Image (tube, rainbow, N blue to C red):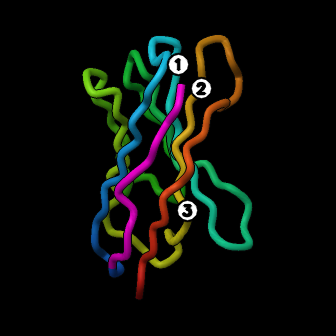
Amino acid sequence: VQPVESGGGLVQAGESLRLACVLSGRTFSTYAVGWFRQAPGDDREFAGSITWTEGRTTYADSVKGRFTISRDRDKNTVFLQMNNLKPEDTAVYYCAVRLRGSRDFDYWGQGTQVTVSS
């Protein structure tokens, strides 16, 4: 399974942005899709995830209430809607796939840059 992110860009604080992650390949083996982010000099951080079949979501405390993950199974796409963005949300955002039977996110996209100016 190969995820490809899109939708990053430069926005001002308080604005919104929606990222998309398109999956190709053996999507029927997908258990969950996660969104992660990494700011310069920081470790990669989990932002949230969604299970592919049930659509059950999980969020990090830092984004809860501002970010929403959804999926369109017909289009093999997962979305990350980010509202009320803050400068500290600036990072490269990655989409990753966890397969059925796996405990880890094994397949990663190339990332998309999100920059929030104050």
Q: Position of residue 97 (x, y in %)?
A: 56, 30
Q: Quadrant of the N terminus?
A: top right
Amino acid type at circle 2 is Arg
Whether tag 2 and tag 1 are in contact, CB under 8 A, the answer is: yes
Residue at 45%, 12% (x, y): give it.
28
Residue in front for this viewpoint, 22 or 84: 22
Residue at 42%, 77% (x, y): give it.
116
Residue 104 against residue 92 in the figure, above or below: above
Whether tag 2 and tag 3 are in contact, CB under 8 A, the answer is: no
SS at circle 1: strand
| Crowd tier of the residue under label 3, counting other residues whose Cα lies within 10 Å: few below 14, some 14–19, many 20 or above | some
Residue 97 against residue 35 in the figure, above or below: above
Residue 32 in sight in this render = yes
SS at circle 2: strand
Q: Give the magenta part as a residue range.
A: 1-11
In which quadrant of the rendered view does residue 50 lie? top left
- In the rendered image, which residue does mark 3 sit on? 92
Residue in front for this viewpoint, 82 or 62: 82
Q: Position of residue 79 (x, y in %)?
A: 34, 43
Mark sitting earlier along the chain (2/3): 3
SS at circle 3: strand
Q: Which mark is residue 31?
A: 1
Assign the magenta stretch its main secondary structure.
strand
| Magenta residue check for 10 | yes
| Magenta residue check for 39 | no
Q: Is residue 41 left or right of residue 89?
A: right
